[in-house]
Amino acid sequence: MNDYVGYDVLAVEDKAMNLSFPLTVLYPSSTPGWPESLGPYELNVALKAPPKAGAWPLVLVSHGGGSTPLVYRTLAHYLARHGFVVGLPEHPFNHRGNNTWEYTAQNLVARPHHLQLAADALLHHPQFAAVLKPNAVAIVGHSMGGYAALALAGGLPMTGPRESPAGAPEPVATVADGRVRALVLLAPATGWFSHPGALRQVQAPILLLSAEHDAHTPPEYAQLVRDGVPDPAQFTHRVVANAGHFSFLSPFPAARVSPDFPPSQDPPGFDRARFHEELNPEIASFLAQHV
């Protein structure tokens, strides 16, 4: 286990779409950290510290629709302490500050594309390229991030009713990335892979965690993945008892916890902080086996 975690934010360019997006990076470092205020959150990190020498696997964390990267900060911090470089892209026009691409075909194309650009940016970065294990990328995707993970790993999505103005489903132009070695899907949105053969090209091992009380991603979304991948032995699924859709987000500061802010809420009796004490090592253990 590494004692210290570095923190940086890079700008990733998408020349094809004429935009750029921020990529938050947490990584093993030899520089002592201290509590830093990162928006409404606090995290013990060393800002812009050099990465620790090694050959660390890369993990990309894809946030849910209309969300933000730092709601997965405790998982990212845990993974960085345990030997992973973690990149958290803010998906353009599908985040809390600007969600204008929600329910559009453009978003279905852009999300996996931007994960690929994030991987490229880190694997070719002057500092991080020297400490990253080549061609060893894992993706953690929550909700809409689960869609992006499956699409980049070889899934063949089709547009749904909301993204199909003509009324008929159409193929989404995505490109598989052979560097993807493992997927962790947290309450994933998978309806775009409901047609036959949609997931037959997904070879990466998958850990899928569903929430028992999920009002956003129903149980059949997990079944789509289980029935769709070519090798059931590479698929691990667990239903988290009494969890809700947002239970996979890092616990919020007390000032942000309110019934008026659904991401901060869990089903009655569910202890999110305690759950994350189990969740983070479970994910780290799975990733360590496969990347």
Image (cartoon, rainbow, N blue to C red):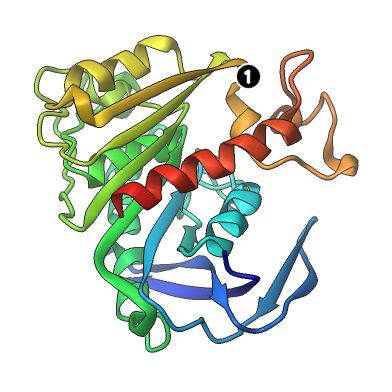
Q: Residue at left 57%, top 43%?
A: 280
**Quadrant in the picture for residue 66:** top right
Is 105 left, or right, of 32 in this rendering?
A: left
Is 53 left, or right, of 168 in this rendering?
A: right
Q: Nearer the viewer, residue 169 or 45?
A: 45
Residue 30 visible? The answer is yes
Q: Nearer the viewer, residue 118 or 241?
A: 241
Is 241 left, or right, of 43 in this rendering?
A: left
**Quadrant in the picture for residue 211:** top right
Q: Residue at left 38%, top 22%?
A: 237
Tell me where residue 244 appears, x and y as whole percent: 62, 20
Say above or below: 23 vs 219.
below
Which residue extends farthest front? 1
Say above or below: 262 vs 285.
above
Crowd band around label 1 with a 10 angstrom C-alpha radius: few (<14), some (14–19), many (20+): many
Which residue extends farthest right? 255
In which quadrant is the C terminus drawn? bottom left
Dot 1 falls on a residue whose secondary structure is strand
Q: Nearer the viewer, residue 84 or 263?
A: 84
Q: Residue at left 22%, top 44%?
A: 153
Say above or below: 32 vs 70.
below
Residue 101 visible? The answer is no
The amino acid marked with disc number 1 is Ala
Count the numbered circles shown: 1
Q: Residue at left 24%, top 40%?
A: 151
Provide the residue designation for mark 1: 243
Tell me where residue 120 appears, x and y as whole percent: 29, 70
